[in-house]
Amino acid sequence: MFYMIYSEDAANSLENRLATRPAHLARLHDLNEQGRLLLAGPLPAIDSNEPGGAGFTGSLVVAEFTSLEQAQHWADNDPYLAAGVYVKSTVKPFKKVLP
């Protein structure tokens, strides 16, 4: 089943986010290589694909896991959470309808 992981950034987290990004992306690449990643990306703080110094307000990941507990465990071990980029992550079941 798919699960959405919505994570919220701490205030002024851009510098920390950029420093931790390689470790964060490595986990997403692993999910993608396993064919379990539906989508992933950051949420710009302004209406722009390149927000510059405005940074991001969080991230959204939709991926396949065997259970809600497994999805929560994956979210709880995100390098962004450990580094203080994220203040919290919300994990919920996701039913893909379209496309």
Image (cartoon, helix red, strand yellow):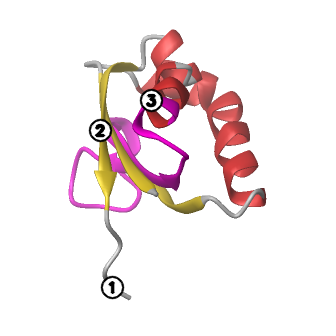
Kindly report which numbered mark, 1 or 2, lies closer to the viewer in this rendering: 1
Cα distance in 3D space between marks 3 and 1: 25 Å
The residue positioned 75% from the left and 57% from the top of the image is 34
Provide the residue span drawn in magenta: 43-70
Closest to the observer, 22 or 47: 22
Please provide percent x and percent y for residue 68: 40, 37
Closest to the observer, 4 or 50: 4
Closest to the observer, 11 or 62: 62
The residue positioned 62% from the left and 33% from the top of the image is 24
| Residue 47, image quadrant | bottom left
Amino acid type, mark 3: Glu
- Label 3 CA crowd tier, 10 Å (few <14, some 14–19, many 20+): few
Is residue 64 one of those drawn in magenta? yes
Q: Which mark is residue 78?
A: none
Please provide percent x and percent y for residue 12: 31, 19
Please provide percent x and percent y for residue 58: 32, 37
Q: From what the image shows, is residue 92 above or below residue 94? A: above
The residue tagged 1 is 98
Q: From what the image shows, is residue 49 above or below residue 84? A: below
On the rendered image, what quadrant is the C terminus found in?
Answer: bottom left
| Residue 10, image quadrant | top left
Does residue 2 appear in the picture of this structure? yes
The residue tagged 3 is 69
Q: In this view, does 91 lie to the left or right of 64?
A: left
